[in-house]
DNA sequence: GAGTTTGAAACT
DNA sequence: CAGTTTCAAACTC
């Protein structure tokens, strides 16, 4: 990777063809005895809101004094600079954020830090374009650019356009990195000046119309994500059926916003249909959705799963008849009238789904089962379980300590080893605390983004982080304020030391209890599903006879939950030790989780 | 992997 | 705003 130095004041569009000999180093001024320049540089740096890759000496860390010289947490503090370095060999516990990270993130003072950078940001190393392992182990394509002339500071560069630093790209003369944040900032400003929406998702949720405008028929068709290209494409030769086309790439239909020629990316297009025909269809669909998600080209609406998209589309149909701009009324009508659909193979499941009355409202099977009070009850129950687990653990711990006291007298030689262990425990403690008191962290912002990295491990730029920092701060403040068994500044180190184990025990118990509840919930859902299926079969001998009121077919009335559904928060029956096999996915939110 | 095609972005 | 150029990804061979 070629990395060039660049004056921070250089305009984005006027870069020298070759990199400068050295880049602007905010620290150099300090050392060269120019405090004024240093102050200016510091101000600039602060304005740029770059996150400091270092620990502040004044940062409060609740560890033993003798442990401070240990430089262990340092690598974890620099996710942006070395996002792919497989460090953490010292800590098997890899769940972010660490104690120090929490402090850094929760303390405003720790964010902009134009002081000495302890570790020089390393230029992203070129890596072959390959699969990138996500946290769940699913290999996903990591997007990396190959820019040569744009310095990765123009929208040509996908990384820049996505608002992320280049990391591991094959680009040359890259300025889209921490080292050149000033130049990058200028480029962002210049880009925004040209187009204030330059960094917004290109695919919006039908900005110039309602969603149903570009909704298409479900029958035997590829089901695109809902959305529209805000600007529309201008394709001429690709027929909007190649990835040159931004609409196609985002897996959406061309809309009235497009000015494309000879467009084939519309509802009912034979070419489009042929393109997705065959076994490749799903693969391509998923790949496109993934690409779109990776590219950040689409908004959250576009990130819906295919199933969600399907539901959305179907339900949208209930909103009214839509006519695509491409004028495919005959095709649409044909399908709406339930005429045979000339599709087979992998599309059959869609066809079958489409044979179900076209106007269906989807309701989660558990919608009548899970009530607000149930959730409250569950929370209470888990709190009780947690408390009991802590008590039980304390009892066991006391017994253990009595035993170990006798043995300790003969094991003084192992003291140093124990110190290290204590240190690790102390470091891990806040993570455990975070887990027990703030599981919402993962849900709200995603554990992978907490430390300033995207899910694929790529560093996010300060601009991107700035959009999230408030949320992060709130999250961490919340979690630090959350229910803890130990005062935040306790000096009882022995007590602190045992906390991770207590938390682990509590977490275990809580999760087990929660699992039991989920099992019951699943059982309830299945019962309800079966009931629904049975009554549906009895009451509706043929699907065409299903009465549709206002275009909505409502499922048969389901008796009250009290009579039908076992209470979720009752003691677990003895035969529930095995997780029930869910043969069909539960609709609604649960399937997402 | 090199060369070509393509369309968005940038520029005039 | 339209035409042209630049650019990098997609595509082809």
Image (cartoon, coloured by chain):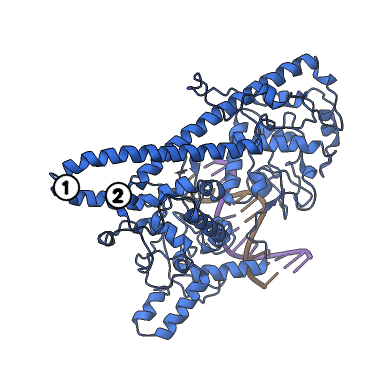
Chain colours: A blue, B brown, C purple
Quadrant where the N terminus of chain A is found in the figure: bottom left
The residue at the point 39 percent across, 55 percent down is: A99
Quadrant where the C terminus of chain A is found in the figure: top right
Q: Does the image show residue A80?
A: no
Q: How far across and down, in percent of the image, does residue A496 sit?
A: 34, 51
Residue A323's quadrant in the figure? top right
Residue A315's quadrant in the figure? top right
A210 or A22: nearer the viewer: A210
The residue at the point 36 percent across, 45 percent down is: A500
A18 or A56: nearer the viewer: A56
What residue did someone put label 1 on?
A: A414
Q: How far across and down, in percent of the image, does residue A249 sit?
A: 64, 45
Q: How far across and down, in percent of the image, does residue A150 sit?
A: 54, 63
Whether callout 2 and callout 1 share a subunit is answered yes
Q: Does the image show residue A478?
A: yes
Secondary element type, mark 2: loop
Label drawn at residue A90: 2
Q: Is residue A171 left or right of residue A257?
A: left
Q: Residues within 10 Å of mark 2 (few under 14, many from 20)?
A: few
Host chain of mark 2:
A
The residue at the point 74 percent across, 37 percent down is: A313
Relative height, residue A4 to residue A499 (above, below) = below
A214 or A30: nearer the viewer: A30
Relative height, residue A463 to residue C13 (above, below) = below
Cα–Cα gap, marks 2 and 1: 19 Å
Label drawn at residue A193: none
- Name the N-terminal-most of marks 2 and 1: 2
Secondary element type, mark 1: helix
Q: Is residue A263 left or right of residue A149?
A: right
Q: How far across and down, in percent of the image, does residue A308 sit?
A: 67, 37
């Amino acid at each position: 990777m070629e990395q060039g130095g660049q004056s921070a004041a250089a305009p984005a569009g006027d870069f020298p063809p070759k990199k400068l000999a050295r880049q602007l180093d905010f620290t150099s001024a300090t050392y060269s005895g120019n405090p004024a320049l240093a102050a200016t540089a510091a101000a600039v740096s602060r304005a740029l809101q770059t996150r400091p890759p270092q620990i502040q000496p004044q940062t409060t860390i609740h560890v033993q004094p003798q442990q401070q010289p240990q430089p262990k947490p340092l690598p974890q503090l620099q996710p942006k600079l070395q996002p792919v370095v497989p460090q953490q060999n010292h800590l098997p516990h890899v769940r972010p954020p660490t104690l120090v990270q929490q402090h850094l993130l929760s303390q405003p003072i720790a964010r902009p830090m134009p002081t000495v950078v302890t570790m020089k940001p390393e230029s992203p190393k070129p890596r072959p374009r390959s699969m990138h392992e996500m946290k769940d182990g699913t290999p996903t394509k990591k997007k990396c650019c190959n820019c040569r002339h744009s310095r990765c500071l123009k929208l040509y560069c996908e990384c820049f356009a996505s608002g992320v630093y280049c990391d591991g790209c094959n680009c040359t003369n890259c300025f889209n990195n921490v080292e050149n944040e000033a130049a990058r900032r200028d480029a962002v400003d210049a880009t925004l000046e040209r187009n204030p929406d330059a960094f917004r998702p290109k695919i919006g949720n039908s900005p110039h119309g309602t969603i149903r405008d570009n909704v298409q028929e479900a029958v035997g068709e590829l089901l695109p994500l809902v959305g529209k290209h805000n600007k529309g494409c201008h394709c001429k030769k690709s027929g909007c059926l190649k990835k040159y086309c931004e609409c196609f790439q985002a897996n959406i239909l061309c809309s009235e916003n497009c000015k494309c020629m000879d467009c084939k990316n519309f509802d009912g297009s034979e070419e489009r249909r042929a393109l997705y025909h065959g076994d490749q269809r799903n693969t391509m669909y998923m790949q496109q959705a993934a690409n779109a998600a990776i590219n950040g080209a689409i908004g959250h609406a576009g990130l819906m799963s295919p199933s969600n998209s399907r539901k959305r589309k179907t339900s949208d149909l209930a909103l009214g008849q839509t006519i695509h701009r491409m004028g495919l009324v005959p095709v649409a009508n044909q399908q709406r009238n339930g005429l045979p659909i000339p599709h087979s193979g992998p599309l059959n499941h869609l066809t079958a789904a489409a044979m179900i009355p076209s106007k269906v409202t989807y309701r989660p099977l558990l919608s009548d089962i899970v009530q607000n009070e149930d959730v409250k009850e569950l929370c209470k129950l888990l709190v009780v379980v947690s408390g009991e687990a802590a008590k039980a653990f304390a009892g066991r711990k006391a017994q253990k300590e009595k035993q170990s006291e006798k043995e300790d007298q003969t094991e003084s030689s192992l003291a140093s080893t124990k110190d290290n262990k204590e240190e690790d425990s102390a470091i891990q403690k806040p993570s455990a605390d975070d887990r027990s008191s703030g599981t919402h962290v993962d849900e709200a912002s995603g554990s992978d983004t907490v430390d300033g990295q995207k899910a694929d491990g790529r560093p996010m730029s300060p601009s991107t982080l700035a959009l999230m920092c408030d949320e992060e701060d709130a999250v961490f403040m919340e979690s630090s304020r959350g229910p803890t068994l130990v005062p935040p500044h306790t000096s009882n180190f022995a007590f602190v030391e045992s906390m991770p184990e207590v938390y682990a025990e509590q977490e275990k118990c809580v999760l087990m209890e929660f699992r039991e509840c989920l099992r019951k919930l699943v059982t309830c859902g299945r019962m309800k599903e079966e009931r629904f299926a049975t009554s549906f079969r009895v009451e509706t001998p043929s699907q065409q006879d299903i009465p549709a009121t206002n275009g909505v077919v409502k499922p048969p009335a389901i008796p009250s939950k009290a009579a039908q559904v076992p209470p979720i928060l009752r003691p677990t029956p003895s035969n529930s030790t095995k997780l029930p096999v869910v043969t069909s996915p539960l609709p609604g939110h649960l399937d997402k989780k």
